[in-house]
Amino acid sequence: MAVGYKSDSSASQFQDELAAATGGRIVEGFPQYTPEEEALIAQEIDEEQNKKRRDARKELVKNAVKQKIKQEAEKKAKDVLVKTAVRTGLRSAVVYFSGTIGTFLAIAAALIVAVFLIIFALKYTCETEGWKGTVVRGAGTVASWFGYEEYNVCERLAIIQDAANNTPTQLPAVPPPTTGDGLDLVAITGVPTGTSGDFRLRSCMLRRVQIIYNNAQALGIDFIITSAYRPGATVGSSGRLSAHGKGEAVDIVIVPRGQLNDPAFQAKIRKLVQLSTNEGFVPPRGDTLDEYNNPTEAATGGHVHIEFNTAPNNGSYCGVVS
């Protein structure tokens, strides 16, 4: 508010004018207030202080809310991380165990298939080559680690097969006869033989050889017997008595002799092997060995070997096979 001050006024005039303008409430330069004015001023000061306190409280509340929101967000984030970790862990565990179970099932299936393949290979080899076949000899070597003798593999397989078919295994009724030189040997008749050797057989063996020869002739296959009875003959280095030493084995050679790389000659070998197995030279009663393609350690030339095996109690299957 203008107080009528003039720059050229004297100091006393200025004081008078100031006092007039303020109603005489100026004391030594400070205003003088009435009680009502002082109360109003105090009220304004209180209101201003209250406002500051309210603003401070609002700021505290706002900060507290922010802190609470931050804590809740951190808690939710932790919960999400934990749940994600649990789900990931469970998923990983499921994948791991599924993979483990799958691997186990695959291995189990492979083992089952392998067992069937081994049994099939053993059965086929026993039927076509007998206990001297490569597969059977390998299985016999493994079996020997567990106390089984190699030549029993085919016999055991046949016994198992008979049991599965509920067919009793045929066993000899009596040991071989012990007449003459210890055996009921007869000269080979009706079948061509070589020029050197003892061409005698037990009569039960000769009958089978004659049938094989007649059937081979019907198929256009000629053969000769190159080895029959060999007294004291043993099986390779095993020391076991050979079926040749009992007059229960022959070596058959197809004539004219052929080449192994000739399909026609191989067909003759397969037919001769099949004719021999048809006559009972299959485990456990006997063996048929293709020693053209799989010669044994004592083989001196290609041939098909057929024999009757030694039965339990040192008996013979020869006299009891129908």
Image (cartoon, rainbow, N blue to C red):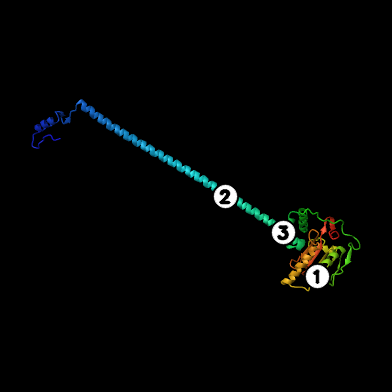
- Name the quadrant of the C terminus: bottom right
Q: Which mark is residue 96?
A: 2
- Going from N to C along the chain, the mark reached first, 2 or 1, is 2
Residue 207 screen position, x and y as percent? 85, 65
Mark 3 or mark 1, which is nearer to you? 1
Q: Is label 1 in a helix, a strand or a loop?
A: helix
Q: Which residue is drawn at 25% across and 31% down?
A: 44
* Residue type at the position of mark 2: Tyr
Q: Which residue is drawn at 64% across and 54% down?
A: 107
Mark 2 or mark 1, which is nearer to you? 1
Most distant residue in the right direction: 180
Residue 275 against residue 152 in the figure, above or below = below
Pointer 3: what residue?
A: 120
Quadrant of residue 243 within the rendered picture: bottom right
Residue 320 screen position, x and y as percent? 85, 59
Residue 197 screen position, x and y as percent? 85, 69
Most distant residue in the bottom direction: 256
Label 2, label 1: how far apart the Cα atoms are: 65 Å
Q: Is residue 67 visible?
A: yes
Q: Residue 218 carries which label?
A: 1
Label 3, label 1: how far apart the Cα atoms are: 31 Å
Residue 165 lies left or right of residue 79; in this view the side is right
Q: Residues within 10 Å of mark 1 (few under 14, many from 20)?
A: few
Residue 91 against residue 208 in the figure, above or below = above
* Residue type at the position of mark 1: Ala
- Evaluate if marks 3 and 1 touch, with contact meaning CB atoms under 8 Å apart: no
Residue 165 lies left or right of residue 104; in this view the side is right
Q: Is label 2 in a helix, a strand or a loop?
A: helix
Q: Is residue 136 visible?
A: no
- Going from N to C along the chain, the mark reached first, 3 or 2, is 2
Quadrant of residue 264 within the rendered picture: bottom right
